[in-house]
Image (cartoon, rainbow, N blue to C red):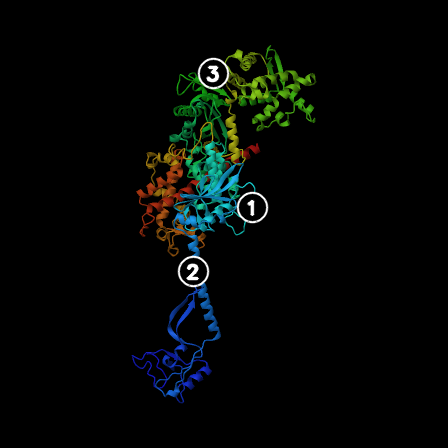
């Protein structure tokens, strides 16, 4: 109910028609006394609810609306008030129903401040209106809608002093001239008759983007000031001026000019502008066919990457290839360069994903993918480069079972034992520098039959691909020669065998000459009692004695001198350890021309020096001939014996004549009655290799049509160099594992494949192997999980009873699998399916989790425990019955998951009563649980096998110490 007016005779708010606004008595006591004095009512005492209506106040005393001035336009904005209010000091003075003398007439006057505020508002409003009129007049003077109006409004005087203009009916040209020495138009702005504005640099259209001027070319002009701003922007960006140095530009540039590229802080507009310049330069280089345009394209790409966000980075093929090669050579250096800020390169994960797509991993080259890498590189070879030499050698590795990436490596291919050596097979072109490892096989206690089978398979596979293997080179190991002799019908060692792929073709076999040189030195050191060798004279056949003590005496005579005849001699070369005997560099310090000349020079002062020098001379000359690897070596060293073989005729080449004489000398040495000689194996190997080289010479010139022949091609140095890279990339270790061999070989293959320019390959694209190679999954899929080998595995109650004591550990593993699965899925529905509530756990098998838990471990449901339990039993039975077949599978993790999934589904081990998740079906949950289970089982299997091996080796070491 509304308040009523307290004034006598007033009917305000007493009826439905007399609605008025009422006001309370003021709280100010002085003002309240004035209200009581003015109201004609005797002895009236107001209460808190006493009101006076608006009919008793002057209109000037009541505020019915509020107003404020807009600071931008000066317009006064007025809004009505919901409840009217009295102005300060207002007193009721109108009483219409009372005698006339009770009412008083009062005049309301504004205060001084109110008058000043009103005056200020009026002046501000007038100023705004005047400014609008002036701006409207200005727009009329600078804006245009057609080309004729533009020509009228355009004022050339506002252009910079070094700019010129040409006005035509169809367009207007504004340009800047440069003298070098003749006039050249560097920058130009063209306004066509459609008012379109375009910018040019040396006749090439460019795009300018200015945040300060809010302009981006090309655009349609509507104001002549836009033309002046574009010219100003281009003039400030003049980076091609040769009269101003960078420091001058930095001094003269304005701090507020964000578009100036001479400022000390770079910005994105600078990158766009420089990119336009470089794009134009590259177009010029393309016309000129400049060889360095790739480098400039890289610079343009870097500028382009600089001007865009990280989410929009896109790299060219060349950049991805360079980044991949650099990352495989040194990941640390790649990361350092990436974070240095000097260059923008792909993230290492991007590089790794690219390298993984190439599928150069040697571990997949078994069975269906045998020689797959050689199959793919074959198409990049020229026709005359396909005549190959097959090199084979073994590298000793650390026996170690390693689980990584779903597969286990470390077991030998021929037995169930761990591999102790890796046989590496490499092909090398006789006509080019092409060389690639095509197969690595981990072995343990290899015999000649297995090696012969490997050789036959590899040679036939290479021939099917298109390679022409005509020669095999190995060291002087009895197993190698025995394996090669199986190609002969009589099983005898020979220099040439019928080719296993085509019996009408020859397959030559010789020993590594580097290995033979080390054998000669070792035979000399091992000769008893005084390290002497009896040998025939090279010309007369008379007996001579090569005394190793003569070389030692030479060393002791000169070891304290600053200048020496035999400067190459050292204690390591004269007294090598068993490991140092493998170093050919120490051998060459003995078989050295300076040592031979030193022995000759000392003469009678060293006993046996002359005959020892003769022996050194024979071996050194033979080594010079068989160690020629480059066609210009002889010319560089001015030695005819180090030049390539240019003819198969002995009379035309002194090197072939020497080798023929060398064979006769070896025959005399063999048939003569000499006491201390080379071992029969070494003597046979040297004779065999020298004779084979002579026959190979005839074959290469007659059949292969070689222009010259390099005997250094028929060595295993390429393999030894590969072994050195394996050890270096594995951290400088000598005894590396087979996993390290595989991973380093993969890196080396990537470096070889991704070369930008290669004589063998040409240009290689990033997608070179997309459809040409079997993937690891293909290899795994080929081994069906329902084959007879695996389907015979069954589980009964006795198998469960055997692992009953391990149920607490199995339950703990099941809880861990739930944790890993839920960490990835983050689903509450799946959590209810896999995990029990803590208060529901009472069984003894959960005791391990309960004792170790501090509130975070999960208690798996019975279904999850069953999945892990049966997987564990299946894995143990699989190893008991078919461990060898299992180890031959490539991706063991994928195979086990498929096998266990099939068993779980066939036996309904994962049946639960909880609600089924619509996002993550049961198959998905089973897969993730089994993936975690298989990872744990395979990792522990490898650890168990390695521990057994370490224990055996430790026992052997203790026994050898006691002996």
Give neighbour class at mark 2: few <14, some 14-19, many 20+ (Cα, 10 Å). few
Q: Which residue is mark 2?
A: 133
Residue 347 visible from this viewpoint: no
- Identify the image quadrant of residue 59: bottom left
Instruction: Tell which tag, 2 or 3, sits nearer the viewer.
Output: 2
Q: Which badge, 3 or 1, comes first in the chain's sequence?
A: 1
**Left or right of 96 on screen, residue 952:** right
Q: Residue furthest top?
A: 540
Q: Position of residue 166 (x, y in %)?
A: 45, 43
Q: Which badge, 2 or 1, comes first in the chain's sequence?
A: 2
Compared to residue 329, the image places residue 516 above or below, namely: above
Q: Cβ–Cβ below 8 Å for labels 2 and 3?
A: no
- Identify the image quadrant of residue 376: top left
**What secondary structure is marked by label 3?**
helix
**What secondary structure is marked by label 2?**
helix
Q: Position of residue 686 (x, y in %)?
A: 53, 18
**What secondary structure is marked by label 1?**
helix
**Left or right of 54 on screen, residue 530:** right
Give neighbour class at mark 3: few <14, some 14-19, many 20+ (Cα, 10 Å). some
Q: Which residue is mark 1?
A: 249
Residue 600 visible from this viewpoint: yes
Give neighbour class at mark 1: few <14, some 14-19, many 20+ (Cα, 10 Å). some
Instruction: Tell which tag, 2 or 1, sits nearer the viewer.
Output: 2
Q: Position of residue 877 (x, y in %)?
A: 38, 38
The CA distance from mark 2 to mark 3 is 100 Å
Compared to residue 132, the image places residue 158 above or below, namely: above
On the rendered image, what quadrant is the N terminus found in?
bottom left
Of 178 and 317, the residue lying toward us: 178
Q: Which residue is mark 3?
A: 701
The CA distance from mark 2 to mark 1 is 41 Å
Q: Which badge, 2 or 3, comes first in the chain's sequence?
A: 2
Instruction: Tell which tag, 3 or 1, sits nearer the viewer.
Output: 1
């Amino acid at each position: 109910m509304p308040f009523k007016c307290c004034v006598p005779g007033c009917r305000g708010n007493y009826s439905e028609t007399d609605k008025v606004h009422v006001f309370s008595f003021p709280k100010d006591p002085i003002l309240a006394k004035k209200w009581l004095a003015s109201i004609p009512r005797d002895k009236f005492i107001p209460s808190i609810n006493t009101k006076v209506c608006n009919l008793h106040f002057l209109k000037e005393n009541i505020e019915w609306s509020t107003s404020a001035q807009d600071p931008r336009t000066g317009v006064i904005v007025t809004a009505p008030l919901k409840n009217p209010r009295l102005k300060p000091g207002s007193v009721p003075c109108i009483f219409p129903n009372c005698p006339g003398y009770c009412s008083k007439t009062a005049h309301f006057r504004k205060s001084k401040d109110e008058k000043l505020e009103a005056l200020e508002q009026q002046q501000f409003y007038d100023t705004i209106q005047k400014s609008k009129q002036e701006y409207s007049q200005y727009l009329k003077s600078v804006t245009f809608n057609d080309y004729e109006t533009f020509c009228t409004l355009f004022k050339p005087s506002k252009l910079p002093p070094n700019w010129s203009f040409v006005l035509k009916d169809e367009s207007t040209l504004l340009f800047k001239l440069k003298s070098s020495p003749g006039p050249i138009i560097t920058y130009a702005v063209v306004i066509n008759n459609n008012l379109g504005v375009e910018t040019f640099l040396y006749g090439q259209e460019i795009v300018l983007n200015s945040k300060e001027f809010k302009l981006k070319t090309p655009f349609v002009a509507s104001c002549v000031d836009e033309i002046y701003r574009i010219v100003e922007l281009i003039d400030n960006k003049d980076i091609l001026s040769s009269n101003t140095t960078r420091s001058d530009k930095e001094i003269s540039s304005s701090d507020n000019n964000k578009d100036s590229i001479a400022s000390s802080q770079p910005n994105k507009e600078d990158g766009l502008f420089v990119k336009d310049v470089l794009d134009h330069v590259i177009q010029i280089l393309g016309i000129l066919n400049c060889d360095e345009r790739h480098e400039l394209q890289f610079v343009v790409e870097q500028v382009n990457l600089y001007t865009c966000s990280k989410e929009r980075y896109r790299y060219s093929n060349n950049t991805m290839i360079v980044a991949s090669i650099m990352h495989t050579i040194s990941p640390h250096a790649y990361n350092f360069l990436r974070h240095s800020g000097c260059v923008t390169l792909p993230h290492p994960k991007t590089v790794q994903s690219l390298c993984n797509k190439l599928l150069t991993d040697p571990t997949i080259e078994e069975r269906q993918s045998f020689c797959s890498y050689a199959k793919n590189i074959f198409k990049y070879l020229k026709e005359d480069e396909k005549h190959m030499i097959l090199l084979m050698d073994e590298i000793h590795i650390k026996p170690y079972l390693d689980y990584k990436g779903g597969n286990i490596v470390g077991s030998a291919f021929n037995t169930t034992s761990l591999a102790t050596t890796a046989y590496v097979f490499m092909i090398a072109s006789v006509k080019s520098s092409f060389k690639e490892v095509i197969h690595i096989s981990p072995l343990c206690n290899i015999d000649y039959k297995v090696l012969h089978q490997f050789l036959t398979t590899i040679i036939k596979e290479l021939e099917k691909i298109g390679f022409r293997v005509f020669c095999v080179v190995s060291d002087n190991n009895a197993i190698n020669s025995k394996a090669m002799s199986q190609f002969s019908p009589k099983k005898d060692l020979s220099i040439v065998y019928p080719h296993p792929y085509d019996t009408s073709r020859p397959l030559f076999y010789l020993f590594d000459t580097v290995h033979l040189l080390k054998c000669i030195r070792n035979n000399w050191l091992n000769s008893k009692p005084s390290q002497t060798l009896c040998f025939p004279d090279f010309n007369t056949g008379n007996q001579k004695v090569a005394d190793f003590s003569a070389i030692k005496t030479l060393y002791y005579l000169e070891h304290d001198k600053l200048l020496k005849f035999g400067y190459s001699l050292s204690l390591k070369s004269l007294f090598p350890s068993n490991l140092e005997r493998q170093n050919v560099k120490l051998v060459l310090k003995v078989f050295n021309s300076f040592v031979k000349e030193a022995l000759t020079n000392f003469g009678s002062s060293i006993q046996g020096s002359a005959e020892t020098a003769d022996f050194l001379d024979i071996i050194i000359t033979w080594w010079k001939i068989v160690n020629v690897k480059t066609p210009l070596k002889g010319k560089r060293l001015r030695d005819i014996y180090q030049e390539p073989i240019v003819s198969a005729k002995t009379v035309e080449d002194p090197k072939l004549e020497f080798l023929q004489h060398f064979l006769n000398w070896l025959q005399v040495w063999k048939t003569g009655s000499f006491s201390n000689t080379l071992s029969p194996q070494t003597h046979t190997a040297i004779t065999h290799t020298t004779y084979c080289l002579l026959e190979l010479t005839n074959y290469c010139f007659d059949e292969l049509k070689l222009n010259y022949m390099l005997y250094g091609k028929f060595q295993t140095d390429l393999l030894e160099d590969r072994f050195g890279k394996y050890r270096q990339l594995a951290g400088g270790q000598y005894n590396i594992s087979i996993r390290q061999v595989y991973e380093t070989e993969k890196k080396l293959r990537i470096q070889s494949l991704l070369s930008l320019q290669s004589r063998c390959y040409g240009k290689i694209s990033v997608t070179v192997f997309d459809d040409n190679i079997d993937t690891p999954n293909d290899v795994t899929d080929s081994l069906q999980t329902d084959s007879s080998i695996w389907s015979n595995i069954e589980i009964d109650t006795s198998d469960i009873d055997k692992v009953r004591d391990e149920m607490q550990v199995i339950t703990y593993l099941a809880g861990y699998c739930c944790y890993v699965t839920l960490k990835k899925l983050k689903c509450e529905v799946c959590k209810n399916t896999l995990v029990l509530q803590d208060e529901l756990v009472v069984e003894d098998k959960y005791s391990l989790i309960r004792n170790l838990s501090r509130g975070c471990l999960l208690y798996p449901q019975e279904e999850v425990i069953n999945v892990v339990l049966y997987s564990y039993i299946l894995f143990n039975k699989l190893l008991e019955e078919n461990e060898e077949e299992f180890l031959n599978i490539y991706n063991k993790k994928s195979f086990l998951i498929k096998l266990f999934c099939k068993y779980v589904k066939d036996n309904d081990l994962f049946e639960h009563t909880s609600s089924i998740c619509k996002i993550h079906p049961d198959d998905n949950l089973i897969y993730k649980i089994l993936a975690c289970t298989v990872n744990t089982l395979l990792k522990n299997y490898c650890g168990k096998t390695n521990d057994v091996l370490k224990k055996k080796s430790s026992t052997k070491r203790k026994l050898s110490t006691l002996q």
